[in-house]
Amino acid sequence: MNKIIAITNQKGGVGKTTTAINLSSCLAAAERRTCLIDMDPQANSTSGVGLEKENIESSVYDVLIGSKSLREVVLPTELNYLNIVPSSISLVGAEVELVSMMARETRLKTALEQIHDDYEFIIIDCPPSLGLLTINTLTAADSIIIPIQCEYYAMEGLGRLMSTISLVKENLNPGLEIRGVVLTMFDSRLNLSRQVSDEVRKYFTDKVYNTVISRNVRLSEAPSFGKPIILYDIMSTGAENYMSLTKEVLAQ
């Protein structure tokens, strides 16, 4: 089973971290052993599952530079089946430090070998860029989920992302595939949302999930309380959406 899934889109504000947090949480709620890896220096996935950024002693940064193993930095969360490898602001400097290191593109992949058999799913939240941190993630991943927001300029930059994926496939990870595309911030009242949905489905055809993630106030509030949506408000539309998306991912 393709268990290592990268959530990526170099465009910011598309619901990437929200998807990483809530997909991994719903997988855990389905009693699938899941690890969420936060590769974004902003550490929003880390705080989004209830960890205080300021109290993080070791992070994925220490793994990438080789001072710690992944098993040493994995932390538990409120959900029994969900662990996290936290991020920290130190990760900002990792791109520079990795440049001079041997096998710089495969450091995460090598580190993941240690915990690969501990989990049924490993979800990786990428930074909103196509630098070395994202290249490391794409090299380590089996597949990719691309969140695309139903707003103006939704398709902007996707060509560059697709080119990067092709380059990684050619040179570093021939088995990498697009697992699916998830439409986020959907508002059924707006013609624009429906137009973007049609455009994305035309471009990616059967790769687009049937589930769309609707605009939802409770979903927006949940990160400020350090909770995935299923712990913050399981009756909300956002929780229903992510539980539905998780069912699709499990069915693949």
Image (cartoon, grey):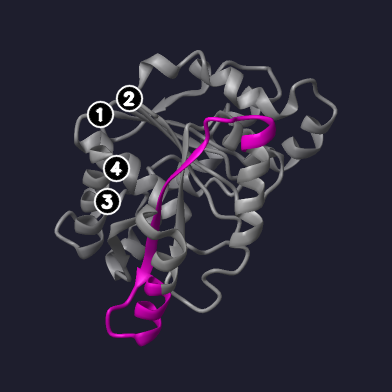
Is 228 situated left or right of 172 in this image?
Answer: left
Q: Which residues are magenta?
A: 169-198
77 and 96: which is toward the camera: 96
Q: Quadrant of residue 220?
A: bottom left
- Per the image, the residue denoted by label 2 is 120
Q: Residues within 10 Å of mark 2 (few under 14, many from 20)?
A: some
Q: Are marks 2 and 1 in contact (CB under 8 Å)?
A: yes
Among the 4 quarters of the image, the one containing residue 198? bottom left
The residue positioned 61% from the left and 45% from the top of the image is 165
The kind of residue on which mark 4 rests is: Val
Question: Residue 226: image x %, image y %?
Answer: 37, 49
Residue at the disc numbered 4 = 249
User: Marks 3/4: CA distance?
Assistant: 6 Å
Residue pictured at 54% horizontal, 69% vertical: 155
Which residue position holds label 3? 245
- Residues at badges 3 and 4 in contact (C-beta under 8 Å)? yes
Kindly report the distance in space between the C-alpha atoms of the residues bearing marks 2 and 4: 13 Å
- Say what amino acid the circle numbered 1 marks: Arg
Q: Secondary structure at mark 2?
A: loop
